[in-house]
């Protein structure tokens, strides 16, 4: 029988020495008897001794619940990043799709400034990048239960 797979009790002897052998729920015991015998009193197994390199005995209780921690996103830092490189602050804040759109739009507008058409786009994407970075960081914090 696999360890811990069956409840404690009398079962047919797997070795064939006696009619029944007592399974204590963990392993076969030395108790053997005829059919329908009463179980022997339960005895706790001897504690396991670990080598000196393991000074603390292991804990066999239930595993503690996993506790995950997330660091808050700083809206001010995300805004500062987007001040220098529009769109990257939004990416840092977790809004990657919009951040890439702002960055690509800013670069295209920057190229179009050579013919004076892109000046409005450069200013627009620069401002949008800072506003979105700040609001994305606040939104991310709220979704994770952090008030910022």
Image (cartoon, rainbow, N blue to C red):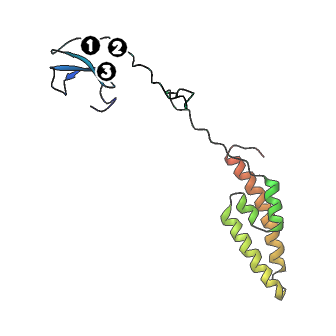
Q: Position of residue 36 (x, y in %)?
A: 18, 14
Looking at the image, residue 86 sits to the left or right of residue 54; the answer is: right
- 112 or 34: nearer the viewer: 34
Q: Position of residue 108 (x, y in %)?
A: 75, 80
Task: State if disc 2 and disc 3 touch (CB < 8 Å).
Answer: yes
Residue under label 2, please give it. Answer: 42
Looking at the image, residue 105 sits to the left or right of residue 57; the answer is: right
Task: State if disc 2 and disc 1 touch (CB < 8 Å).
Answer: yes
Task: State if disc 1 and disc 3 touch (CB < 8 Å).
Answer: no
Residue under label 1, please give it. Answer: 39
Please say if 7 is above or below 103: above
Q: How far apart in space, not on screen, are marks 1 and 2 (Cα)?
A: 8 Å
Residue under label 3, please give it. Answer: 24
Looking at the image, residue 1 sits to the left or right of residue 130; the answer is: left
Q: How many dots with numbers? A: 3
Q: What's the residue at 74%, 54% (across, down)? A: 137
Q: Position of residue 109 (x, y in %)?
A: 78, 79
Mark sitting earlier along the chain (3/1): 3
């Amino acid at each position: 029988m696999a360890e811990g797979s069956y409840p404690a009790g009398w079962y047919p002897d797997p070795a064939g020495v006696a009619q029944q052998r007592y399974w204590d729920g963990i392993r076969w015991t030395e108790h053997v008897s005829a059919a329908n015998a009463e179980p022997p009193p339960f005895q706790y197994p001897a504690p396991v001794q670990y080598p000196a390199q393991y000074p603390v005995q292991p804990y066999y209780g239930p595993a503690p619940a996993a506790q995950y921690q997330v660091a808050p996103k700083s809206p001010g830092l995300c805004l500062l990043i987007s001040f220098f490189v529009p769109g990257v602050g939004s990416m840092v804040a977790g809004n990657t799709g919009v951040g890439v759109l702002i960055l690509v739009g800013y670069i295209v507008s920057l190229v179009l400034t050579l013919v004076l058409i892109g000046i409005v786009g450069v200013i627009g994407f620069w401002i949008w990048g800072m506003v979105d970075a700040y609001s994305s960081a606040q939104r991310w914090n709220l979704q994770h239960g952090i008030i910022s």
